[in-house]
Amino acid sequence: MVILCETKEKAEETLRRIGLILEHLGLGINAEKTRIVYVGDGKAGFDFLGFHFRNVESWRYRGRRYAQMWPARKAMKAIRGRIKEITAPRWKLAQGIFKIVKELNPVIRGWGNYFRIGHSTRCFYAVSQYLYEQLALYDSKRRGKAGRRWETHDNTWQKSLGVVSLRTQWLPAVS
């Protein structure tokens, strides 16, 4: 749970009260995951449900800050690990690249659908670049070539594979 308070003292008191309520229910607060963070200056943020939340200064209106969220480092590491798990094993070289893409698409689609809200565009770009790099390495290994052979792995090649595109959800402005 995330609780917003105006001052550090109020946050500490709220944490103490929640601890008492949970203790009464036979539960406890996980000390490793629980912390009080000042997000007003944008220097610190917090992770919750796979997202990283931070108060970021507007690039258009200097001095104004807005709450933004994007996939947390742990979520980025997890999707890269899952992509590598699907593309890297040598025994999968016998399969065609289209079979690998067919296995990757539900993973990418599910991850992208979860994280499409918020400010995830940069993270989506990084995941897409990593995905295409891993597919190029897979293709190079399959053909017995060294390296990525980027001259043959251009945008046309990437589009021909049929990999799901990661896109963010643009929400309409509320007036």
Image (cartoon, grey):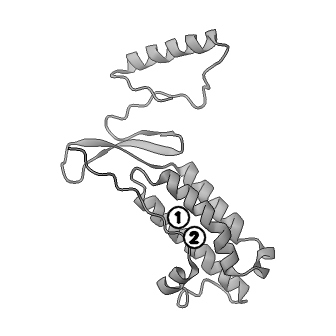
Asked where in the image residue 13 lies, by quadrant, the reply is top left
Residue 41: x, y in percent? 31, 37
6 to the left or right of 124: left
- Identify residue type, mark 1: Val
Q: Where 27 falls versus 38 (above or below)?
A: above
Mark 1 neighbour density, 10 Å: few (under 14) some (14–19) many (20 or more): many
Residue 83, horizontal then vertical, whole percent: 64, 65
Left or right placement of residue 42 versus residue 124 in this view: left
Q: Front-most of 48 and 174?
A: 174
SS type, badge 2: helix
Binning the other alpha carbons within 10 Å of mark 2 as few (below 14), some (14 to 19) or many (20 upward) gives many
Q: Residue at x 47, y 29 (%)?
A: 2
- Residue farthest to the right? 91
The location of residue 48, given as percent across then percent down, is 51, 38
Residue 16 numbered tag: none
Q: Decide: is 50 above or below 14.
A: below
Looking at the rendered structure, the secondary structure element under dot 1 is helix
Q: Which residue is mark 1?
A: 127
Front residue of 147/159: it is 159
In space, the residues marked 1 and 2 are separated at their CA atoms by 6 Å
Kind of residue indicated by mark 2? Leu
CB under 8 Å between callouts 1 and 2? Answer: yes
Q: What residue would you read off at disc 2?
A: 131
Going by the image, does 152 lie left or right of 52?
right
Q: What residue lies at 59% left-to-right and 88% top-to-bottom? A: 149
Q: Residue at x 66, y 79 (%)?
A: 98
Q: Position of residue 51 (x, y in %)?
A: 49, 45
Q: The C terminus appears in which quarter of the rendering?
A: top left
